[in-house]
């Protein structure tokens, strides 16, 4: 097996899906705090928000989540027992700047993450920190329309700089925006965008994208200046798009779909807008406002590594008769007859993982960090009190085997943090029922349960994987 020495095995979570304590210690309301479970959720995620405060009668899963805010020591002890070398987590912007506009950061918020990082470091677990994982202070959405306004760039820079200064020496791995390409699919989730009647959505989305790309470059610059030993990366929701047939029309369609996502990383990693993006803007009458200094800033401040999530591949066809399977999928895709699907309709494609890793490395020639991968499934606690999640072990085993092949192919991969090592709230559906963890959390979709943690069968399996540095899958 190919895993290098010092490989960063671990798991990944996000503030809004794990912490809870949504207004505690001065935290402000964030976009995710307005996402209920149920039918309204998808409308909001696409940019149709009715109210800037939580509504009576709706259930908001982020408000308590799994209460990681109060239980992180217990959870870290379990991660340590599994042998984690790293934990990827995100900082909630609104814990540090509750409205996003304060002059001074909220000390209680900063202290929470200080204690959390100390606990990790004490347990020899490297924190891998995402600066923005799907949350924006609601105040900035209300006042500026979120990332559609250039104002957010400076506010984000201030937030990121505050973090680099405070956690210098404690955090060595940073990432700017989680799944930055999500902005094009779920604009509220990716960038806090809310649309009004008559808005030119594409124009707003690409303008917001430009603002995030500039903000990301400014964060890279600040990180390199303040904390020269740290590494800062981007983060892509990856997964190659296959052409359904060898019809060149289908092949071109697949290429264009992939470029929709690569666009972001091309800018963050190569430092300039690719020609195909400029053509897309021309063809669609989009005019992106840029400041004179932006071009040089993007060019001079590219990322150190490419973080990415991989759950599934996608497939595309220009033939309208080929079956669509977009339900439950954030990215549109057609049915791939060669592949099975998860209970939420996401294709299961281990080989696609190897292909995707090779594709990314061929394109960027920078170290890759797999910061999300896993199977969302319904778990049943058996009579012996344990979840026997062989299906999860099977999924992960096959993916890790392909990742090891990618490393043999010459792809440089520095770590692997599987998604939701402890059950957390699902980002797309808001359910607890869609579980990824090695650790079961007793809580249901309506918020009932003791929040007790218990080990699933996969716990010991992953422990062995780490212990043997991937020799024993
Ligand atoms: C990624 C996100 O899109 O996929 C995570 O970065 C998310 O926040 C994960 O949880 C899995 O998606 P879901 O919808 O199953 O939680």
Image (tube, grey):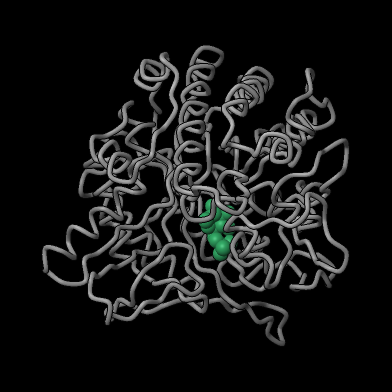
The spot of residue 392 in percent (x, y) is: 50, 72
Residue lying at the far front of the rendered structure: 198
Identify the residue at horizontal 43%, vertical 24% (top origin): 290
Identify the image quadrant of residue 66: bottom right
Query: Residue at horizontal 80%, vertical 29%?
Result: 111
Q: Quadrant of residue 150?
A: top right
What residue appears at the point 52 percent right and 61 percent down from the top-left corner? 462
- 34 vs 140: above or below: below
- Looking at the picture, how far across and down is residue 346, in whole percent? 44, 71
Residue 389 shown left or right of residue 368 in the figure:
right
Q: Is residue 11 above or below residue 213?
A: below
Residue for point 79% across, 19% down: 104
Check the image and name the residue furthest to the bottom.
383
Q: Nearer the viewer, residue 341 or 54?
A: 54
**Left or right, residue 105 beside residue 76:** right
Q: Is residue 102 visible?
A: yes
Nearer to me, 469 or 440: 440
Quarter of the image where the C terminus is located: bottom left
Q: Quadrant of the N terminus?
A: bottom left
Q: Write down which quadrant ligand 1 falls in.
A: bottom right
Q: Position of residue 47 (x, y in %)?
A: 60, 54
Would residue 43 appear left or right of 414 to someone viewing this image? right
């Amino acid at each position: 097996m190919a895993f290098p020495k010092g490989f960063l095995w671990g798991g990944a979570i996000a503030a809004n899906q794990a912490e809870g304590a949504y207004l505690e210690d001065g935290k402000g309301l964030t976009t995710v705090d307005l996402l209920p479970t149920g039918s309204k959720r998808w409308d909001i995620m696409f940019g149709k928000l009715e109210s800037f405060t939580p509504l009576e009668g709706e259930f908001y899963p982020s408000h308590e989540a799994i209460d990681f805010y109060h239980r992180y020591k217990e959870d870290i002890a379990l991660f340590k027992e599994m042998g984690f070398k790293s934990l990827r987590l995100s900082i909630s912007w609104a814990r540090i700047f509750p409205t996003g506009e304060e002059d001074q950061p909220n000390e209680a918020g900063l202290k929470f993450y200080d204690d959390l990082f100390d606990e990790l470091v004490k347990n020899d677990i490297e924190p891998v920190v995402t600066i923005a994982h799907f949350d924006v202070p609601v105040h900035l959405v209300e006042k500026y329309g979120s990332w559609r306004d250039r104002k957010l760039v400076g506010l984000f820079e201030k937030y990121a700089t505050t973090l680099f200064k405070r956690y210098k020496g404690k955090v060595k791995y940073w990432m700017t925006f989680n799944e930055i390409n999500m902005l094009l699919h779920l604009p509220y989730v990716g960038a806090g965008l809310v649309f009004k009647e008559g808005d030119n959505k594409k124009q707003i989305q690409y303008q917001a994208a430009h603002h995030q790309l500039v903000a990301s470059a400014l964060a890279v610059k600040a990180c390199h200046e303040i904390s020269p030993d740290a590494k800062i990366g981007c983060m892509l929701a990856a997964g190659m798009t296959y052409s359904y047939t060898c019809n060149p029309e289908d092949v071109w369609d697949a290429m264009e779909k992939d470029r929709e996502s690569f666009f972001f990383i091309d800018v963050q990693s190569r430092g300039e807008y690719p020609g195909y993006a400029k053509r897309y803007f021309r063809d669609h009458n989009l005019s992106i406002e840029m400041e004179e200094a932006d071009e040089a800033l993007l060019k001079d401040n590219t990322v150190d590594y490419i973080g990415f999530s991989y759950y599934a591949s996608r497939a595309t066809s220009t033939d309208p008769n080929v079956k669509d399977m977009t339900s439950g999928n954030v990215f549109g895709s057609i049915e791939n007859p060669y592949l099975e699907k998860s209970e939420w309709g996401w294709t299961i494609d281990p080989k696609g993982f190897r292909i995707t890793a090779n594709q990314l490395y061929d394109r960027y020639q920078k170290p890759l960090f797999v910061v999300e991968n896993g199977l969302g499934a319904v778990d049943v606690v058996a009579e012996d009190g344990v979840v026997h999640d062989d299906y999860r072990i099977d999924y992960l085993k096959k993916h890790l085997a392909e990742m090891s092949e990618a490393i043999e192919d010459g792809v440089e991969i520095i770590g692997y943090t599987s998604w939701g090592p402890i059950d957390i709230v699902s980002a797309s559906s808001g359910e607890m029922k869609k579980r990824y963890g090695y650790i079961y959390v007793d809580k249901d979709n309506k918020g009932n349960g003791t929040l007790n943690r218990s080990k699933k069968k996969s716990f010991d399996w992953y422990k062995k994987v780490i212990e043997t540095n991937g020799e024993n899958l």
